[in-house]
Amino acid sequence: MSETSDIRRGMFYMIATCAVFAIQDGVSRHAAETVSVYMIVMLRFWFFALLAGMWAARSNGGFRAAVRTAFPLLQALRALLLISEICLIMFSFVRIGLIATHAVFICYPLIIAALSMPFLGETVGWRRWLAIVVGFVGVMVIINPGSAILTPWTLVPLACATLFASYSLLTRYVARKDSANVSFFWTGFCGAVIITPLGLLHWQPIALADAGWIAVLCLLAITGNWLLIKAYEAADASSIQPFSYLQFPFVSAVGLLVFGETLGVNVLVGVAIVAGAGLFTLWRERVRAKANPAS
């Protein structure tokens, strides 16, 4: 009963995480229509760095423990990948919308599965490779290459998914020796250092209303990440990860109701294919983990 209760609590936390992140993306799109993306991301990471510093100060070992990493270059690369992904996806929100962006972006678990062999040396069986191929067929259905409105921006969400998958895989790799506190600290501070020159270069006066939206964006980011941490504390990732696909219907509701976006039949069909393939790969990972508990 206790395990069932933990999974249920983790499930609710993950659903809440998806809802908060969907609202965050809506606020991101709204803010990026009038304020420089680089400036918004810079302010977010200043807030992130401040939080990471406060977190490190309260953790065992303080700043000295948080700074000590076995992979300084990889930690910096993680921050660079995350910064690049956030900037690109915000540009994509403005250019092609929330729905079109997330419809393709949800393929990132399949990219993680495909890249886990060269990145982490994991074995990917034929069933998961088949699911990966099927998933990318779904991506092609979403992108609709034969469409007259196909533009290079249509491929940007795929680049974002690849960047985020690479960031996630590097996070798993550095976790072999670095604690979560170390990765959190390095992501915040390296991210702030990387984005600050671009943000200052694109500095502009901010209207009071825009400043309010950026403040809301920072609070939503912190809330979403806190809920995500609580979700993984309550239950194992394999039990609750499938619920992360609920972010697409949440973000679709924001896109439809707030921004007047449209949801095409090809997007619905493609998302169903991608989500199905992604859920299958998560299930196969869970099966392999049970078969090889020591791995």
Image: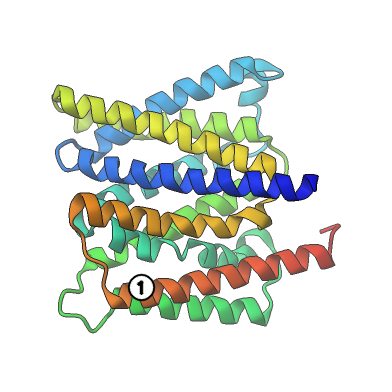
Tell me which residue sits at (39%, 59%) in the image: 249
Tell me which residue sits at (18%, 56%) in the image: 260
Instruction: Tell me if residue 206 comes above or below residue 130 in the rendering.
Output: above
The location of residue 9, given as percent across then percent down, is 64, 44
Quadrant in which residue 219 is drawn: top left
The location of residue 30, given as percent across then percent down, is 21, 42
Tell me which residue sits at (66%, 68%) in the image: 283
For residue 212, say whether it is visible. yes
On the picture, is 244 further left or further right than 128? Answer: left
Q: Secondary structure at mark 1?
A: helix
Which color scheme is applied? rainbow
Quadrant in which residue 252 is drawn: bottom left
User: Which residue bears the numbered disc 1?
Assistant: 268
Nearest to the observer: residue 87 or residue 18: 18
The amino acid type, in three-letter code, at marker 1 is: Leu
Label 1 crowd bin: few (<14), some (14–19), many (20+), radius 10 Å:
some
Instruction: Tell me if residue 27 comes above or below residue 269 in the rendering.
Output: above
Nearest to the observer: residue 232 or residue 150: 232
On the picture, is 159 further left or further right than 117? Answer: left
Quadrant in which residue 43 is drawn: top left
Quadrant of the frame with the C terminus: bottom right
Tell me which residue sits at (28%, 41%) in the image: 28
On the picture, is 82 further left or further right than 178? Answer: left
The location of residue 186, given as percent across then percent down, is 54, 32
